[in-house]
């Protein structure tokens, strides 16, 4: 019997629920347990049990109103769950404030681009970095962040004059600067050209491969999802409908039906 095994079987070694779900002896980075969010009488997420492994690149898809953005906002603490728990890296983080979760390694890029239009590219890139670095290190990290966004040479340009694709790249740089272990991206390529999409796909894949950052990416574009995803989760009416490889999801006729809203009484229209 291995050391780890004998420890696990030892009744004197107590594990909390959080340690059991996402502790040292598992690969699971994040786990939600029965996560519920209601708005008035409407249930946006209905007892979701969702998990992400360390270093995994997960895509989250599903019709409009399925609860995708709500799930990510519950994970970041932007929204407070009505019921259920969230475990991260061995800890129960359900009660933590959003900034405390950022400190633990969870960052999110929201659906609406949120670079500061009046500030220059350099000033935007500096915002997250200045929270933890100064002097020469700060200058180096800011320069790297701008370079990674493909914006070298545009340092003094106001962010409002960048293209939509460049703004998305800048914003990914800003959240990646916080050195997260888990990065949540809500529709990062919506409204972008094919070329801009493939640049974002490269960027996300590189951050995942080279820096080991785990991702949850909400996206509708099936080519984009097929290019980047290790695994796909399909949400429908506030719960997990399917989980599998891109091939399994693409070949599943039930998934076509939920998008067309023809899978029964309620359909896919929860807008
Ligand atoms: P998705 O991102 O999958 O399109 P959302 O998570 O944004 O869906 O929303 C899920 C459902 O919850 C939708 O029907 C939406 O109208 C509702 N909803 C989301 N946020 C709120 C809110 N702040 N107040 C009331 N209803 C909301
Ligand atoms: Mg959404």
Image: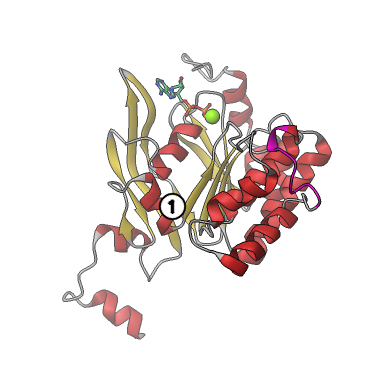
Q: Quadrant of residue 166?
A: top right
In the image, residue 130 lies at what x, y percent?
53, 56
In the image, residue 80 lies at what x, y percent?
32, 36
Q: Residue furthest left?
A: 12
162, above or below 212, in the image:
above
> Please, what secondary structure does the residue beneath circle 1 have?
helix
Left/right placement of residue 32 relative to residue 219 reads: left
Q: Magenta: predominant secondary structure element? A: loop
Tell which quarter ligand 2 is in: top right
Residue 159 on the magenta segment: yes
In the image, residue 233 lies at what x, y percent?
54, 42
Could you say which is closer to the camera, residue 9 or residue 76? 76
The quarter in which the N terminus is drawn is bottom left
Left/right placement of residue 69 relative to residue 41 reads: right
Residue 58 on the magenta segment: no
Magenta segment range? 153-160
- Count of numbered circles in the view: 1
Left/right placement of residue 115 relative to residue 3 reads: right
212, above or below 59, in the image:
below
The crowding category of the residue bearing disc 1, from other C-alpha atoms within 10 Å (few below 14, some 14 to 19, many at least 20), is: many
Q: Which residue does the image show at 57% across and 18% down from the upper left?
A: 261
Q: Is residue 31 visible?
A: no
The residue identified by callout 1 is 102
Q: Is residue 260 visible?
A: yes
Q: Quadrant of residue 148?
A: bottom right
In the image, residue 262 lies at what x, y percent?
57, 17
Q: Which residue does the image show at 48% across and 56% down from the upper left?
A: 131
Q: Which residue does the image show at 46% across and 30% down from the upper left?
A: 67
Q: Which residue does the image show at 53% across and 63% down from the upper left?
A: 133
Q: Quadrant of residue 134?
A: bottom right
């Amino acid at each position: 019997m291995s050391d780890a095994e004998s420890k696990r079987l030892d009744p004197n070694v107590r594990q909390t629920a959080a340690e059991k779900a996402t502790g040292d002896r598992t690969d699971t980075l994040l786990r939600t347990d029965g996560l519920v969010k209601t708005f008035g009488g409407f249930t946006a997420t209905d007892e979701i049990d969702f998990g992400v492994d360390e270093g995994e690149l997960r895509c989250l898809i599903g019709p409009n109103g399925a609860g995708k953005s709500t799930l990510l906002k519950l994970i970041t603490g932007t929204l407070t769950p009505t019921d259920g728990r969230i475990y991260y890296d061995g800890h129960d983080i359900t009660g933590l404030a959003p900034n405390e979760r950022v400190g633990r390694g969870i960052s999110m890029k929201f659906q609406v681009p949120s670079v500061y239009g009046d500030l220059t590219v350099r000033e935007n890139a500096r915002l997250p970095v200045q929270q933890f670095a100064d002097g020469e290190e700060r200058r180096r990290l800011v320069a790297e962040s701008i370079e990674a966004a493909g914006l070298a040479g545009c340092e003094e340009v106001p962010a409002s004059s960048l293209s939509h694709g460049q703004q998305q790249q800048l914003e990914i740089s800003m959240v990646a600067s916080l050195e997260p272990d888990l990065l949540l991206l809500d529709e990062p390529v919506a409204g972008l050209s094919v070329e801009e999409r493939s640049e974002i796909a490269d960027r996300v894949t590189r951050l995942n491969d080279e820096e080991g950052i785990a991702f949850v990416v909400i996206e509708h574009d099936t080519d984009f999802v097929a290019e980047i995803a290790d695994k796909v989760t399909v949400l429908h009416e506030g719960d997990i409908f399917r989980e599998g490889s891109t091939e399994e999801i693409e070949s599943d006729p039930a998934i076509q039906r939920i998008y067309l809203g023809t899978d029964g009484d309620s359909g896919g229209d929860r807008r």
